[in-house]
Image: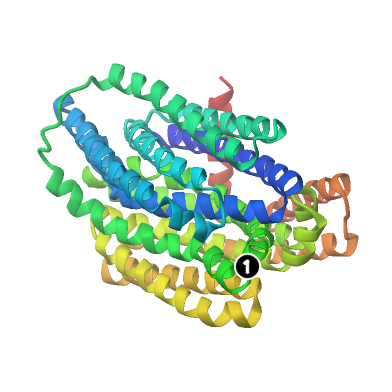
């Protein structure tokens, strides 16, 4: 894979993540404004549970597919990787289905929702997890265009069906059915494509032990990551009630939306890095990591300052003034957490290349324990602000621990442009001050402030020579290449 193709893939993935973010922001105001904050709290707990259980069903196999498949040449081995993992994930999801059917009444009482919503959720998990196996296969085969197409189709289709169901007064039941229908459609389409691409055969589980030794430790990190990212909703619901989950969730989503700037790199990096690392082209690996991290920080640092100063008007637009007044102050903490998360993702690539995935599991387990312990203390004392603070501290621990291990223990270092980070922070602070003085209120003034802030940042970052000439030449070369 050339740098040009990698950059093109990153842009496609960035557009895809933008569509995903837009879809989420379309759903958020519809549910909060039509069904109210409390129903949004129930919706949040259901989707959080989906995010919790999916890693256990997947057992980290998407990581194994992306790590091992790019270097595989034999078609039979490719088939066995895909269909072996598919079979295991399918049977694991059936166990979750049986569990939810048996305990549906108790779970529905805990969530404060209708029993039927709990019964539909595990069926969604089945198709969602199988779709993840297929999508990971497309990523590993570097079919990024197809990956983006199916991802956008799923997010937009889901949003449209959810909106339709709510306006037809089917309420949350219609919304949850909409998610299921889209997952089934995506499964049918992408499954047909995968079969045409690689064929279908009974799995032999040839190298399943090797895949599991790599993937199972990521299960610990995924579960622990979920605790850091999502368990705060449960703590808020337990200590403060579902209404405060409804206040907290939109602000959390707004802050977390910045992670879309890291997602394209996180999705595009593993396949080429694995290929070059296995071929011992270490300089290429370091260059990919160096420029990926710099471009990520060039966008997310000003975005964090911007979303922080505009948190209240943005929340009023995408949800309700009631929600904005009760939660805007947590956005800066969550947004800063996303900076740390994106930096962690870049450093964690080193650990994955070295196949030391047990370490990431241990790091996230410790981060999760810190998060849970602090939530017990901070949420009763500081309310939803306490939950946001504990999230930030957990991400900080994960980043520092990964940095120390990757750079010191594994002795795998790549260049970090600290001078650029300093310049970006200073310029972003200037942008923040100007927008704060303007104090925009309402949709059009907020949009104008975003455009103004973006212009201010990029003008000053170029004036301060934040990018070297060779980096600008590379960008120009890519733009010429893309326009052909």
Is residue 276 visible in the rendered image? The answer is no
- Closest to the observer, 338 or 364: 364
- Closest to the observer, 187 or 410: 187
**314 vs 79: above or below:** below
Percent across and percent down for residue 420 are: 59, 61
Is residue 304 toward the left or the right of residue 437 in the image?
left
Q: Quadrant of the N terminus?
A: top left
Percent across and percent down for residue 443 are: 85, 46
Give me the residue at 44% from left, 59% from top.
Answer: 226
| Quadrant position of residue 444 | top right
Is residue 247 visible in the rendered image? The answer is yes
Q: Residue furthest top?
A: 196
Percent across and percent down for residue 166 are: 68, 36
Task: Categorize mark 1 by other alpha carbons within 10 Å: few (<14), some (14-19), many (20+).
Answer: some
Give me the residue at 44% from left, 32% from top.
Answer: 5
Number of numbered markers: 1
Element marked by disc 1: loop
Give me the residue at 41% from left, 52% from top.
Answer: 289
Give me the residue at 15% from left, 31% from top.
Answer: 203
The residue pinned by badge 1 equals 241
Q: Quadrant of the C terminus?
A: top right
């Amino acid at each position: 894979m050339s740098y040009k193709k990698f950059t093109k893939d990153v842009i496609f993935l960035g557009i895809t993540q933008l569509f995903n973010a837009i879809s989420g922001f379309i759903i958020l105001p519809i549910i909060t404004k039509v069904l109210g904050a409390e129903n949004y709290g129930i919706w949040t707990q259901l989707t959080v549970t989906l995010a919790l259980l999916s890693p256990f069903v997947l057992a980290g196999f998407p990581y194994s597919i992306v790590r091992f498949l790019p270097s595989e040449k034999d078609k039979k081995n490719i088939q066995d990787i895909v269909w072996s993992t598919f079979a295991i994930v399918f049977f694991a999801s059936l166990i979750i289905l049986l569990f939810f059917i048996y305990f549906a009444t108790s779970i529905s009482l805990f969530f404060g929702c209708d029993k039927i919503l709990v019964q539909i959720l595990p069926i969604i998990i089945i198709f969602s997890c199988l779709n993840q196996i297929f999508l990971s296969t497309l990523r590993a085969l570097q079919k990024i265009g197809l990956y983006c197409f199916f991802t956008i189709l799923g997010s937009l289709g889901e949003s449209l069906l959810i909106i339709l169901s709510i306006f037809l007064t089917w309420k949350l039941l219609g919304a949850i059915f909409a998610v299921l229908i889209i997952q089934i459609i995506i499964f049918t389409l992408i499954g047909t494509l995968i079969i045409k691409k690689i064929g279908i055969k009974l799995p032999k589980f040839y190298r399943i032990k090797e895949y599991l030794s790599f993937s199972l430790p990521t299960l610990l990190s995924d579960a622990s990551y979920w605790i850091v990212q999502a368990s705060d909703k449960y703590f808020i619901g337990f200590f403060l009630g579902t209404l405060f989950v409804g206040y907290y969730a939109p602000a959390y989503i707004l802050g977390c939306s910045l992670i879309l700037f890291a997602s394209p790199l996180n999705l595009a990096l593993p396949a080429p890095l694995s290929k070059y690392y296995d071929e011992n082209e270490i300089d290429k690996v370091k260059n990919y990591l160096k420029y990926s991290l710099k471009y990520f920080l060039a966008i997310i640092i000003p975005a964090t300052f911007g979303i922080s100063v505009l948190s209240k008007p943005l929340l009023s637009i995408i949800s309700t003034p009631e929600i904005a007044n009760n939660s805007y102050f947590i956005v800066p903490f969550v947004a800063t957490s996303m900076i740390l998360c994106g930096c962690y993702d870049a450093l964690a690539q080193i650990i994955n290349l070295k196949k030391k995935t047990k370490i990431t599991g241990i790091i996230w387990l410790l981060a999760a324990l810190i998060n849970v312990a602090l939530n017990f203390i901070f949420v009763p004392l500081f309310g939803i602000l306490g939950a946001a603070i504990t999230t930030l501290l957990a991400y900080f621990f994960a980043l520092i621990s990964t940095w120390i291990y990757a750079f010191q223990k594994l002795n795998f270092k790549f260049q970090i442009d600290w001078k650029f980070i300093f310049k970006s922070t200073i310029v972003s602070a200037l942008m923040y001050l100007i927008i704060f003085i303007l104090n925009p209120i309402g949709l059009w003034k907020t949009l104008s402030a975003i455009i103004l802030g973006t212009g201010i940042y990029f003008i000053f970052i170029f004036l301060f020579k934040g990018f070297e000439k060779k980096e600008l030449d590379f960008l120009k070369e890519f733009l010429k290449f893309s326009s052909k």
